[in-house]
Amino acid sequence: MNLICLAAGKGSRFGNLGGYLQKCMYPIGLKPFLELSIRNLTMSGIDVSTSSLTLVVGHFKEQIQSYFGDSYNGLKINYVVQDDALGTGHAILTAYQKAGLTGPCVVWLADSYIKPTQFAAILSHEMPVVLSVAPDRDPAHAKIRVSMDDQHITQAWEGDSDYVDIGFWKFSEDIVQRMTGRKEVEYRIMPNLQDAIVDGTRIGHLIEDEWLHLGGTEPTPEINTLRIAARVRQLENMETDQ
């Protein structure tokens, strides 16, 4: 299984913090935000000796590369530079082309906190294409709202449920190759997944209780960041206590 983390964004919704800090490197305790999810990946049961992680980098890429180097807890790390900020769909396809990847992949956004149980669930999911969703009624997220039944995503873009895509996916290689089929300002993942659904692709889902990410702007980017940091620290303390 290919593992890809998208960490090239400029942090345009990160307030003034994005002017000097790659968003995913925001500190939680003494660790960058991204490190927590990479550590959780290595704790998910995945065989790190036969796996590797491709980090797609761009904005302040040196902050990520200098911190993580070429491995983490035995997991090999490769870097692919997305020279042009053309969207998340373009970033995934760039990773495949520049790193020479083949086969399926698990992908997440670097500004999302992913738990070990989430990694384990998506890696073992029986369907080849899977979205993770969580409840969210923020009007700003209307485009990434989904529609779904008990087993499948029926609409991946501008759906009508209370659930939104949270930036954590499993894709087959043929889905990756479709990621620049439609351009919505950028080559975004969700519109291209919607086109795949229209063409007959069946997409499974994992339902989460919450979406923890640093991209929120309500009531301000700074307040959202502090709120997310506090919640993540709470979850980390719970894991330690166990």
Image (cartoon, rainbow, N blue to C red):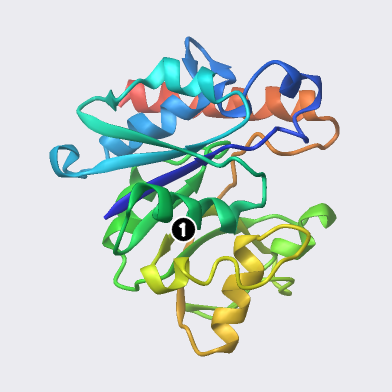
Task: State whether residue 214 is above or below residue 230.
Answer: below
As drawn, which residue projects farthest toward the top? 30
The x, y position of residue 51, in whole percent, is 21, 44
Characterize the local packing of mark 1: few (<14), some (14-19) or many (20 or more) Cα atoms within 10 angstroms.
many
SS at mark 1 in the image: strand
Evaluate whether residue 126 shows in this view.
yes
Task: Give the quarter of the image for residue 214.
Answer: top right
Instruction: Determine whether, in the image, residue 165 is placed left or right of residue 138.
Output: left
The x, y position of residue 179, in whole percent, is 55, 66
Task: State whether residue 228 is above or below residue 140.
Answer: above
Q: Residue at x 19, y 38 (%)?
A: 48
The x, y position of residue 169, in whole percent, is 46, 58
**Which part of the image, by quadrant, shows the N terminus?**
bottom left
For label 1, the residue is: 169
**Which part of the image, by quadrant, shows the C terminus?**
top left
Q: Residue at x 57, y 72 (%)?
A: 193
Task: Give the quarter of the image for residue 105.
Answer: bottom left
Callout 1, which amino acid?
Trp
Q: Residue at x 51, y 12 (%)?
A: 29
Instruction: Determine whether, in the image, residue 210 is placed left or right of residue 107.
Output: right
Task: State whether residue 160 is above or below residue 224.
Answer: below
Task: State whether residue 217 is above or below residue 191.
Answer: above
Which is more toward the observer, 125 or 197?
197
Q: Residue at x 84, y 30 (%)?
A: 220
Instruction: Determine whether, in the image, residue 159 is placed left or right of residue 75.
Output: right
Which is more toward the observer, 230 or 153?
153
The x, y position of residue 106, in whole percent, is 38, 54
